[in-house]
Amino acid sequence: MDTSKSEINLKNLKGMFWEANRAFLENHASLLKRELSERCLCGALMHELNKQLEKNGCNNYYADIEFNRAIENTINNVKQLPDEEGTPKRVFPDIIVHNRSEDNPDNLLALEMKKSKARREAKERDKNRLSLLTSSYPYKYKLGVYYEINHKKRQILVELYKKGRKTSTDSRVIEYKINEEGELEFIRVRLLDSDI
């Protein structure tokens, strides 16, 4: 089965993300336990996203890390977004899911990952980037994911963005622990109450 872009709706995309996230947490708990770098964690999550794309017949779609190329209207075909002053700046989303087509690009998901100890300005910059990437700006990703890992509290904050705005309906906090065998155990998952 080959899934076309018209068949990948937001509900299917969210479902694939949540299933890939579950597999990431279960299969790669040792990475969380060792508090490894964002890039390492993104690589493991990208792997699980690609498995979900394949499982769901999305054979022309790929999860890529720091894929920075654009098709048109950019300098050297590098993705750019305006900064706070409106100056175009190169962007490298941590993970994107897309079809890699130069003729008919289809951007599904952009994910930015941060550790909770990162500076607040860096976190806000990633959130603003997701707002732009999911807005009517040229890239038009269907779904943005802000993914913040708090190793100390054993929590993961996941905020979803669509059409340039954070949505509270699916944003959540995942609380976990890592047992003596090094396996991740979910304590609870709770929805965020508001769009703060």
Image (cartoon, grey):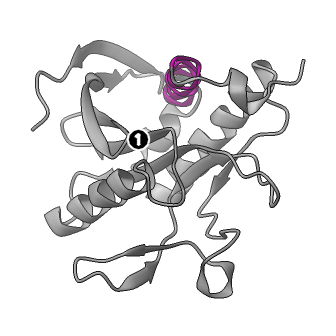
Most foreground residue, 14 or 31 = 14
The location of residue 62, given as percent across then percent down, is 74, 44
Does residue 40 lie above or below 98 as drawn? Answer: below
Residue 36 seen in render? no
Q: In the rendered image, is residue 126 in sight? A: yes
Query: Going 57% across and 26% down the picture, which residue do you hit?
Result: 13
Residue 155 coordinates in the image, percent (x, y): 25, 32
What residue is shown with label 1? 145
Q: Is residue 84 left or right of residue 31?
A: left
Q: In this rendering, would 143 be left or right of 24?
A: left
**For residue 23, which quarter of the picture?**
top right
Give x and y (percent) for residue 65. Answer: 62, 57
In the rendered view, does 191 fall on the left or right side of 109? left
Residue ID at (70%, 27%)? 6
SS state under label 1:
strand
Give the image quarter of residue 70: bottom right
Locate the N terminus by quadrant.
top right
Q: Start and end of the magenta stretch?
A: 11-25
Q: For the point 28% across and 42% down, which residue is it? A: 165
Q: Position of residue 105 (x, y in %)?
A: 72, 52
- The amino acid type of the residue labelled 1 equals Val
Query: Local crowd at mark 1 within 10 Å, few (<14), some, or many (≥20)?
Result: many
Q: Is residue 16 above or below residue 160?
A: above
